[in-house]
Every structure is written in C-alpha cells, then in structure tokens.
Image (cartoon, coloured by chain):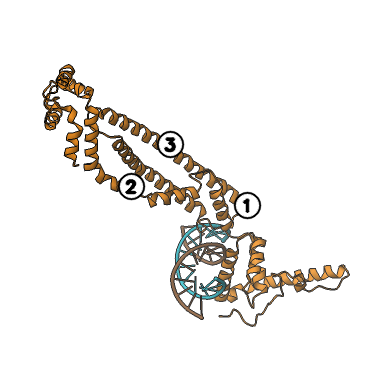
Chain colours: A orange, B brown, C cyan
Amino acid sequence: MDDQTRMMTGLTGLGGLAQADVGDPDSVRKQQSLGQPQQDIGDILQQIMAITDESLDEAQARKHALNCHRMKPALFSVLCEIKEKTVLSIRGVQEEDPPDPQIMRLDNMLLAEGVSGPEKGGGSAAAAAAAAAAGGSPTDSSIEHSDYRAKLAQIRQIYHSELEKYEQACSEFTNHVMNLLREQSRTRPISPKEIERMVAIIHRKFSSIQMQLKQSTCEAVMILRSRFLDARRKRRNFNKQATEVLNEYFYSHLSNPYPSEEAKEELAKKCGITVSQVSNWFGNKRIRYKKNIGKFQEEANLYAVKTAVDAANVSAQASQANSPATPNSGTTSSISSSYNFYPSSVFSS
DNA sequence: TACGATGATTGCCA
DNA sequence: TGGCAATCATCGTA
C-alpha cells in the first residue's frame, strides 16, 4: 500500500468535512451522520493550508474545529507517518553517531588528572614526583606540592561549576523546545519520535559546547603541569651532601666510573634523588672530566685525601675495638671500594 | 647582568 | 639499551 492510498484509507471518515462548515462542529456532525459523499482528501488539506490566508479569528475558529474533529487523530498519525518516511528517515541514518573519540580522549585525560570523577591524588603524586626530579628540598617540594594541588582544585571547581551551568541550560532549553513542540503538535504533525530527534539534536549542539569546556580545561591542566612539572624549568642543584656522595663514588672508581644498577640505586637512595638523575650525573661527570682533566685534578686530590682520612679513621676505630682490621670490601657495600688516585686508563673511549 | 656551573634532554651509535 | 656528545635551560655568584 503506497502512502497516498494509506492516507486516503486512513482519512475515509473525514468525508464531508470540506463541504460542511469546518468552523461549525454541529454542521460537520450533521453532514457526517447523514452519510454525505466522501470529499476528496485534497480539499481537506487545502482548507488546512488555507488557514494562513485567513484572518486570525477565522483561523483560530477553523483550527479549533479541526482539533475537535473525531478523525483528527487519524489524520495526525497518517501525516506523521508520511513525514517520518519522507524526511526524517534520511536524517535518522546520520544521527546514530558513535561516541566522539575526541570527547573520549578529553574525558580520559580529565579523569586521569583528577579534574573529573572522584577527587584523587594523581596530580599530587605527579607534583611530588616532579619536585623529587627537580632535586628540591622536602620543604620546597611540599610547598610546590600544595600549590599545585590548590591550583588543580581551582581548575576542578571551575570545571564542575561550568559543567553544572551547561547541564542546567541544556535541560532548560530541551524542556522549552519539547513543550513548544508538544504545543505545536496540536496543529501540525509532530510525532513523539520527531521530538526525541529534536532533543538529540539539541544535546549534540550542547555537547559541542561541553567539548570546548573540556578542551580548555585540559589546556589549563597542561599549562599547570608544564609550569610545575617541567623539571628543566624547575631545576635545582643537588644539595652539597648528595654531590659529595656522588663525587666520592666517582673519584674512587675513576678507573671505571660506571656504577652498576644496584650501585645507582644505592647512590640514589643516599642522595635522595632518582636513579635516572644518578645516571645523568655520571654521564655529565664523565664527559666533563674527560674534557678537562686538569681542571678536575684538584677536586680529585681533595676526594683522595678525604677517602684516605676516612679509611684511617675506620682503621683506628677497628684497632681500638681490639679486633683485626677489616678491609673496606668487607662491608660489602656496593658503593664503597678502594680509591684509584692515578687511574691507568681514564674511560674506555 | 654576565658568566661559569650544572642538571636535563636529544640524537646518534655500538 | 646504555653511553657519548652536543645543547638547552636554569642556578648561583661575583
């Protein structure tokens, strides 16, 4: 059955509507009950279309008459069906979009940074790691840490407040449009499905605004991170004790200044820095020493004396304890070893 | 403020 | 993947 036939069938009962005065329900009922010849549906629609050409009062009266007509629901549903098939079915195919990957990425990032979702220590951990990487003192790191957290909390608060405003606006606008469409559906064919589609369109529009909010929030977090977590920007020299520990190891292993992983870990622990910082330090030290041995000779001598004095103290303490002298290696520490003042070979390369 | 010192990064190589 | 060499960016000091 084609649409035209279906429409005709569905509207069979509307016969006589055109002939009767549609502004007069009594007249319509009378003519229907009398079984007047069926009026061509085109005439009925013609009358509906002509409403716009009538005066306001006439149009209102005709509208009322049409709304009250017993066949109005049938006409309405058929028109909805036709509209659905002709226009909305084309649109519907494109509306079933998969979740936007861009929004998913932004959501994941905001979640990871602790901006959206439950508040957590992600950002705090990052700040702490950055402070450690920068070699700052515990006091410095805790100040930076709290500062970072405070700023992240500020971003979080703004994000949630904006999100709330957005959701409220979206909900208000959706309700408004839905009410408007429901109201209009009394005079023109608007199916519930069409209202649903309109709501979906509104949500999509608002979702693009939401994406902008998420994007700018991510940018704010990235700027905050780069400001607080960029180790280069926040570089701190290692403290004196850490430098001494590293130098002691370096000069006492001058023939082979390549600490093992275990030694690096132990040095990192002793110095309060990371293993990669220890690696960096040794990399820099080897190169700079090699480039200018003369300049570092004084430093090497200094550490030679220091190591010798330390060794003597240990020896003296051992004698005082009336026990056999214990060799350095006996302590089994991977970072304590004999001092090479004049290395036979300086670096493999 | 200039300059040397120093920690971090990057690209390349074995 | 670790190490080297060059370079960058920041720190500390005169």
Q: CA distance from mark 3 to mark 1?
A: 38 Å
Image quadrant in which the N terminus of chain A is located: top left
Using a 10 Å C-alpha cutoff, classify the residue at mark 1 as few (fewer than 14 neighbours), some (14 to 19) or many (20 or more).
Answer: few
**Mark 3–mark 1 CB contact (< 8 Å):** no
Q: With respect to residue C1, does A182 lie above or below?
A: above
Q: CA distance from mark 2 to mark 3?
A: 26 Å
Q: Nearer the viewer, mark 2 or mark 3?
A: 2
Using a 10 Å C-alpha cutoff, classify the residue at mark 2 as few (fewer than 14 neighbours), some (14 to 19) or many (20 or more).
Answer: few
| Camera-side residue of A55 and A171 | A55
The amino acid type found where label 1 is placed reads Pro
Mark 1 vs 2, N-terminal side: 2
Q: Please name the residue shown 34% across and 33% down the image.
A: A173
Mark 2 vs 3, N-terminal side: 2
SS at mark 1? helix
SS at mark 3? helix
Q: Is residue A66 left or right of residue A345?
A: left
Using a 10 Å C-alpha cutoff, classify the residue at mark 3 as few (fewer than 14 neighbours), some (14 to 19) or many (20 or more).
Answer: few
Q: Chain of mark 2?
A: A
| Camera-side residue of A138 and A15 | A15
The residue carrying mark 1 is A138
Looking at the rendering, which quadrant does residue A253 occupy?
bottom right
Q: CA distance from mark 1 to mark 2?
A: 54 Å
The residue carrying mark 3 is A164
Q: With respect to residue A148, does A191 lie above or below?
A: above
